[in-house]
Amino acid sequence: MKNHSKKLYDIPEVKDYRELLNNTVSKYPDHIAYKYKKDPTAKEPEYVEISYKQFQTNVKEVSTALLELGLEGKKVILIGNNRYEWCTSYLAITTGNMIVVPLDKALPANEIEALVLRSGAEAAIFDKKYEEEFLKIKSNKQSNLKFLICMDQTNDKAEVMEYENLQIKGKEAIEKGNKVYDNMIIDPEKMSIMLFTSGTTSLPKAVMLSQRNICSNIQGIASYVKMYPTDTLLSFLPIHHTFECTVTFLYGIYYGVTVAFCDGLKYIAKNLAEYKVTVFVAVPLVLETMYKKITKAIEEKGKTKLIHTMSKLSHLLLKCKIDVRRVLFKQILDQFGGALRVVFYGAAPMNKDTIIGYNDLGIKLLQGYGLTETSPVIACETDEKQRPGSVGYPLYNLEVEIDGKDENGSGEIKVKGPNVMQGYYQNPEKTAEVLRDGWFYTGDYGYLDEDGFLYITGRKSDMIVLRNGKNIYPQELEFLINKISYVEESIVYAREKTNTDTTIGAKIVYNEDLIKEFLGEKTEEEYKEIIWNKIKEINQSLPTYKHIKEIMITKEPLDKTTTQKVKRYQEMKKISSNV
C-alpha cells in the first residue's frame, strides 16, 4: 500500500543542519533557545538563558576550533548528559563537515572503549566523569584518538582540553579572519551521523545517517504536529538517542522553541512546573507512573466520583466544540506547571486508559513509531487524528508497505523514503539483510487498517513460532499482563519441552507498594497465586495456543536500555537459568 497520508501543515523545507539553524536565527534571533540551571543542586539556582543568535555564534566558534585541529571529515565522539554544550557540540561537528558519533552515557567503560575503537574516531567531547576513561582509550595502540575535550573544568591535564578554552580559540580564530566555517559547503547526502543501536537483541550496529535523512524526518513530523516559538520543551530522555535528538533537540530548532534541560528522573514533575513546559518527549513507563500518582492523589482526597462527573461533562461539551478541560482540571494541571499540552511518546505501547485519562485532563498524547535506521520516525499520530492502539499515520513523505501478510493482514513493515539510513558502517552483510530493492525491512510486524493507521504487533526476532505453525507476538500478551493494576512490567517467553509442544510463560514484575495497597501484606507465594488467577482470566480471552501456562514473579525491574526498552536477550538468559 502506497502511503497516501496528507500534510496538515505547509512547512518550509530544509536540506541540512546549517540551513535549519540559519532559518530559525533569521526569524527569531533573540528568542531563548536554551534555558537551564547553572548548578541544579543549589538551593536558589541561577538560570542561564541562551538566545538563538548566541547559540549560532557558539556553534560556529566550536566548529572553527575543531576544524583548526584538522578534523574535517573525521569522526568525533560525543558523550554526556543532556546539556547546552552537548547541543552546541553536535551542531558544531555536523555543520563543520565532521561526523558526530553520539554514545550512550550509561554504557560501561569496556563498551565505550569498544565503540570508540570501532568508530575510528579521532576526537572525543565528554563530561568530566569520562575523563579517565578516555585517557585510557587514547593510550590504547588500536585507538585513533588524538584530541580529548572535556565539557567541564579538568584537572589541568595537558592531554585534555577544556571546552571553554576550545570555544575561545575558535572565537579568536574568527576574529583574526578565519572563514573556513563560513566558506564550507555541506553535502546533505554524505554520512554525518553515526549512531550505535541500543542492542536489545544483539551487538550494537553502527547506523550511518545523513543530514538529509534527519531533515526530511523533521519535515515529516512538522507536517503532522505543529509547535510554536512560544513552546517550551523539556529535554529528558537520553539525548544521544535519535528519538530525543530528532524530536526534542532538532525539531525544536525547526520551530524556534525553548528547550529546558531536566534535572533527572525524580525531578520531572518539578521541572515541568518550574519551566512551564508545554511539550515533552517521554516513554510510556514515565507517563504511566505520573498518571498513577495523579489518580492515587485523587482517590486519597475522595474526589474520584467528582472527577468522573467532570470528565463526563467535558466529553459532552467537546461534542459541541466547547473545550473546558483545562479549566475544569486546572488544579491537577497546575501540578505540572499548568502549561503542558502535548506529550510525544514511543518505544512501547501505552495503556489505553492512561491515554484517555490524560486526554480528559486536556493533555494530548501522541504516539510515534520508528527506528534509529529511519532517522527515526516512520509514523505518528497527528494534531487532528489519534487512534489509541495504533502508532498513527505513516509520514507523508514515506512509503510504507506490509510484506508477507498473514490471514489477518499482518506482516513485516517495510519503508521507503528519504529518512532511510545509508547502511551499517563496515557491515555490508547486515546492510544487505535489511536494505533490499530500495526498501528498509524494519523487522517489526504490523498492519495498516482501512483508514491508513499503522499498528505494531511485535518484533520479527521476538516472534514465537509454534510447532503447529501458529505465531505468537510476546508484546501482545505483555500488553494484557501489564494492564493488571499492580503489575509494573512483564516479559513473555517460550520454553521447549522434550517431545511435547512449546510452553508459553511470563516473568512478571510487580510494584511492591501497589500490590500491598491492593492485596494487603501477603507472602510471595500468595501474591503469585493471585496473579496466576489474573493470568487465567486473560487466557480466557485468548485462543488456546496463546495461553500462558507458567509464570514467575519478582519485584526486581527488567534489564533495560537507557530508553527503557527491555533487553530481551539478557532477560531470556536469566529466565533459562531459573526455569
Image (cartoon, grey):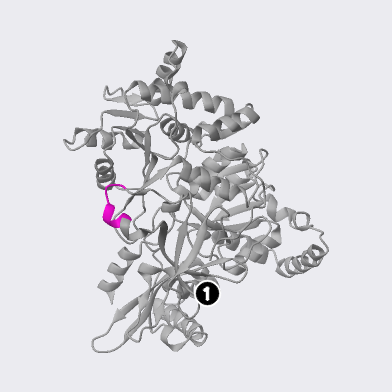
What is the quadrant of residue 292 in the picture?
bottom right
Looking at the rendered image, the quarter that the C terminus falls into is bottom left
Residue 348 lies in the magenta-colored region: no
Is 391 in front, or is 352? 391
Q: Residue at x 58, y 33 (%)?
A: 33
User: Height in image: 20 above or below 370?
Assistant: above
Residue indicated by mark 1: 484
Can the viewer see residue 101 in this picture? yes
Is 501 in front, or is 151? 501
Mark 1 residue crowding within 10 angstroms, few (<14) / some (14–19) / many (20+): some
Q: Is residue 430 left or right of residue 53?
A: left
Is 169 in front, or is 175? 175
Return the residue found at the far top: 176
Q: Position of residue 294 (x, y in %)?
A: 63, 60
What is the quadrant of residue 81 in the picture?
top left
Q: Is residue 223 left or right of residue 135?
A: right
Q: Residue at x 28, y 24 (%)?
A: 157
Which amino acid lies under the numbered mark 1 shown in the image of this protein? Ile
What is the quadrant of residue 101 in the picture?
top left
Q: Position of residue 55 (x, y in %)?
A: 53, 28
Return the residue found at the far front: 437
Q: Position of residue 288 (x, y in %)?
A: 55, 62
Tell me where the magenta segment starts and ends, as one range.
425-431
Can the viewer see residue 51 in this picture? no
User: Height in image: 167 above or below 509?
Assistant: above
